[in-house]
Image (cartoon, rainbow, N blue to C red):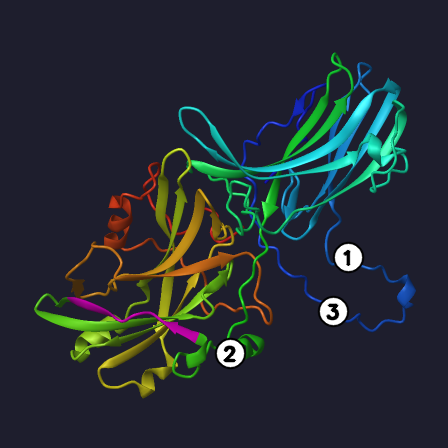
């Protein structure tokens, strides 16, 4: 995303317009410990300290006086890795910055207030907004006393006008969860910023600085800017054996060798024709790695057991390298009507399982993984807006096998969560490169004909044009 100049403002009412481009997505990784310094004769004090995280980026917004000099300055410190044109903040971090005044004449300022709000915005004949989050913090008011040395106890009372230069540091702690009085629903986490080109709904966050004045004919000043909010949820720890595999760069243990580390879906029955000459009945059991919560930019480890009395059919079905398992996303907005966007966003890649040698004659075992794009929006749930994910099982698209119920939809689904942070412990390691294949024809037809398919751009893609980049 190219660097963009800060939006321009005008005295007395200054509101940043909505950026044309979508906020970038980013998987904020926990910083690795610094490597030990290399052996050198140079004194330790002479070696520069390299910071593990970049310095905050300043975003400056101003209101100027009639002489063109800054009269009110709002500075916000954002994470440069998350936003270039607007500030962005992560869950659990404070919104920091400063407020400065440069008043050339006495000014009857009654209060200086910061407002923060989050809105659900829906497109249509006219834009509709639902406020799901709001908070307020006073930078200064007369009850705080001397504006150059304010007190939070509220026992003082400042009666003079403000004149000259003033500087207040700014620090706001966003809550982790919404309150019952707010539109998002009590107990729900603040949602990750959501903005997609063809989506009917988006979530937006705004910060406003308001300078209130005494007197009927005195006008107030406002500075407003949009900012990005990044949720920071993470999965629980995987099984000890899977952690050991990641630590030693070994293959992920199978359901047979690590039964505690896998969740088995209900077995599904698949009926079809093999080589167009005889019908076969197959039982298919899919396994997903526990916990059922995964970090975008990594993979969903999966496994599959195929059982059928027809050994030739078992070999045919076990020869698949993709298909059968998909990650699907459902975006639902029930504010001012109901709109749903339902589409696949990931596909499993398969290879023979090490358990194959121990399999019974009519069984075949496969291991696999679903690659997760780095720009997947994390799971979100506020009262009128949800982003949900599920792993869907379809009949395998195997050569020489034609399922009897092709195109009728998934045989079963398993809800899963997508988050932005890595689980505690060693990082997951993918066994295969990301796949760029499209869904097979039957799966593609199901999503295109679904009542919940996107209304615009029905050409379904599993991967963005930028591949797996964030």
> Residue at horizontal 57%, vertical 66%?
423
Horizontally, residue 438 falls left or right of residue 120, namely left
Query: Is residue 267 on the magenta stretch?
Result: yes
Q: Percent from the top left, x then y, of residue 357?
A: 33, 86
Marks 1 and 3 in Cβ contact (< 8 Å): no
Q: Report which residue position mark 3 lands on.
A: 35
Quarter of the image that includes the N terminus:
top right
> Residue at horizontal 32%, vertical 41%?
458
Looking at the rendered structure, which numbered label has been put on residue 250?
A: 2
Q: Percent from the top left, x then y, of residue 217?
A: 74, 12
Q: Is residue 105 visible?
A: yes
Judged from the image, the secondary structure of the residue bearing numbered disc 2 is: loop
Q: Is residue 218 above or below residue 292?
A: above
Whichever of callouts 1 and 2 sits on the residue coming sooner in the sequence is 1
Whichever of callouts 3 and 2 sits on the residue coming sooner in the sequence is 3
Looking at the rendered structure, which numbered label has been put on residue 2?
A: none
Task: Give the quarter of the image for residue 436.
Answer: bottom left
Residues rendered magenta in the picture: 262-271
Q: Report which residue position mark 1 lands on.
A: 51
> Residue at horizontal 16%, vertical 62%?
402
The one nearer the camera, 76 or 183, is 183
Q: Percent from the top left, x then y, of residue 36?
A: 77, 71
The one nearer the camera, 436 or 386, is 386
């Amino acid at each position: 995303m190219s660097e963009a100049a800060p939006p321009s403002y005008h005295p007395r009412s200054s509101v940043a317009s909505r950026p044309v481009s979508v906020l970038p997505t980013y998987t904020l990784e926990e910083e690795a410990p610094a490597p030990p310094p290399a052996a050198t004769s140079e004194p330790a004090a002479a070696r520069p300290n390299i910071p593990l995280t970049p310095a905050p980026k300043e975003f400056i917004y101003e209101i100027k006086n009639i002489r063109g000099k800054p009269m009110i300055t709002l500075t916000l410190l954002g994470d440069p890795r998350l936003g270039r044109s607007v500030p962005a903040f992560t869950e659990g971090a404070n919104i920091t910055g400063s407020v400065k005044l440069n008043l050339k004449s006495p000014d009857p300022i009654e209060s200086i207030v910061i407002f923060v709000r989050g809105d659900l915005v829906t497109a249509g004949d006219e834009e509709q907004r639902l406020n799901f989050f709001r908070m307020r913090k006073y930078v200064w008011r007369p009850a705080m006393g001397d504006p150059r040395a304010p007190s939070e106890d509220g026992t003082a009372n400042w009666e003079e006008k403000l004149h000259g230069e003033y500087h207040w540091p700014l620090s706001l702690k966003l809550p982790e969860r919404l309150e019952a009085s707010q539109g998002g629903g009590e107990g729900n986490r603040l949602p990750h910023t959501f903005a997609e080109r063809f989506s009917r709904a988006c979530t937006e966050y705004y910060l406003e600085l308001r300078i209130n004045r005494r007197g009927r004919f005195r006008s107030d000043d406002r500075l407003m800017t949009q900012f990005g909010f990044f949720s920071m949820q993470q999965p629980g720890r995987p099984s000890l054996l899977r952690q050991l595999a990641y630590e030693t760069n070994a293959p992920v243990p199978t359901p047979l060798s690590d039964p505690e580390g896998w969740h088995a879906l209900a077995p599904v029955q698949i009926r079809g024709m093999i080589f167009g000459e005889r019908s076969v009945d197959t039982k298919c059991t899919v396994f997903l790695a526990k916990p059922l919560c995964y970090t975008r930019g990594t993979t969903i480890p999966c496994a599959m057991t195929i059982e059928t009395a027809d050994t030739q059919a078992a070999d045919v079905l076990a020869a698949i390298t993709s298909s059968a398992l998909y990650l699907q996303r459902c975006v639902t907005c029930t504010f001012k009507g109901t709109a749903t966007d339902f589409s696949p966003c990931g596909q499993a890649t398969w290879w023979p399982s090490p358990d194959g040698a121990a399999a019974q004659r009519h069984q075949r075992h496969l291991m696999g993984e679903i690659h997760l794009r780095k720009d997947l929006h994390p799971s979100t749930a506020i009262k009128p807006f949800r982003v949900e994910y599920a792993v869907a099982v379809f009949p395998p698209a195997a050569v020489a096998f034609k399922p009897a119920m092709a195109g009728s939809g998934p045989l079963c689904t398993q809800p899963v969560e997508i988050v932005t942070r890595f689980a505690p412990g060693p990082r997951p390691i993918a066994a295969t490169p990301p796949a760029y294949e499209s869904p097979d024809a039957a799966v593609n037809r199901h999503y295109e004909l679904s009542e919940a398919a996107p209304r615009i751009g029905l050409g379904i893609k599993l991967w963005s044009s930028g591949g797996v980049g964030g």
